Image (cartoon, helix red, strand yellow):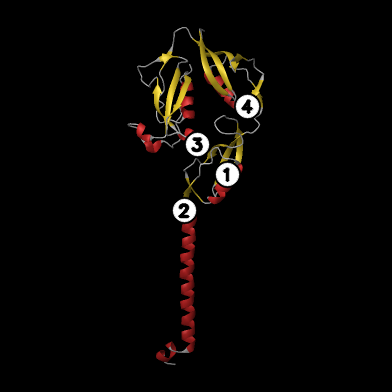
Amino acid sequence: MKFRQFIFSRIFLKHLLFAVIAAVVIVLGTLIWLHLYTYHGKSRPVPDLTALSLDEVEEIVKKNKMRYVVFDSAYTDLVPRGTVYEQNPRPGTRVKKDRKIFLTMNAVFPDSVAVPNIIGNSLRQARAILENNGLMVGKLNYYPDIAINNVLRIKYNGQEIQPGKNVVKGSTIDLDLGQGLSNRKTIPPDLIALRLEEAKRRILNASLNMGAVTYDETVETLKDSLQAFVWKQVPVHNEENQVQLGTPVYVWLTLDSLLLPGKNTLDLNLPPGNEEDMDP
């Protein structure tokens, strides 16, 4: 059979048709797979679930094609009972579809815990022990004593309390501390651009007290207050501006990053760094 006759033969044309169909199927299949793979790889921002009930969380997470896991509970006055207190990843973090969001819920019925015996410990040790037992350090009161930041007495709701007494988990414990004999002073920490919880931690690290908290007009809701950051503080952070131990630090918070001259507002969502506690 001549070549010309072969290429126009029924057998050749049939095989050619099969080859064309196979090529089209392969190309279309590849394009569809690439489309699905590319879509699957797209990231999306994690929704803010703070202060939401589990029913609300379920609806939002499902809509965003994600999943959630409740892995811990705590007790706080910052959000209503039975709602989300913390989440990981944090709101706004970009993740892929089907990502799990780990939630810490605010307990509906908080447990009670025994106040540990921290008398005689340093402030640093007392904080660690209280936090490990689900309690928080409140006001620091300083009294003349030979040791600086040595726990002299512990108080609950303004009254002295003995170790071993039960209180609600998450409660605040005030501490009476030794001031030392040298009238020691400390430098107020730099709180500008920090959220309130981190500002409280740094104030306590400096052996100072949390003063009044003032929000400006940009903060309208509970979620706003959790996202707001410090734009002003008194006393200010200055190496030459030393204050007495236990001095209250007053802060003003906002959502307006324009109030932060000289600050990199792009870094406001980054996890805060650590500072060393001020203890001998």
Identify which amino acid the numbered label 3 is placed on: Lys
> In the image, is residue 265 above or below residue 141?
below
Q: Does the CB distance between marks 3 and 4 fall below 8 Å?
A: no
Identify the residue under disc 4: 169
Q: Please give the label number shown on residue 57.
A: 1
Q: Does the CB distance between marks 3 and 1 fall below 8 Å?
A: no
Q: CA distance from mark 3 to mark 1?
A: 15 Å
Circle nearer the viewer, 1 or 2: 1
Q: Secondary structure at mark 2?
A: loop
Q: Is residue 277 visible?
A: no
> Which of the 4 image quadrants contains residue 116?
top right
Q: CA distance from mark 2 to mark 3?
A: 27 Å
> In the image, is residue 204 above or below residue 221?
above
**Nearest the eye: 197 or 26:** 197
Identify which amino acid the numbered label 4 is placed on: Lys
Circle nearer the viewer, 4 or 2: 4
- Residue sitting at 43 percent across and 89 percent down? 8
Circle nearer the viewer, 1 or 4: 1
Which of marks 3 and 2 precedes in the sequence? Answer: 2
**Nearest the eye: 280 or 237:** 237
**Nearest the eye: 228 or 174:** 228
Q: Secondary structure at mark 3?
A: helix
Q: Secondary structure at mark 4?
A: loop
Q: CA distance from mark 3 to mark 4?
A: 23 Å
Which of marks 4 and 3 precedes in the sequence? Answer: 4
Which of marks 1 and 3 precedes in the sequence? Answer: 1
Q: Categorize mark 3 by other alpha carbons within 10 Å: few (<14), some (14-19), many (20+).
A: some
Q: Is residue 176 visible?
A: yes
Which of marks 2 and 1 precedes in the sequence? Answer: 2
Q: Please give the label number shown on residue 237.
A: none
Q: CA distance from mark 4 to mark 2?
A: 42 Å
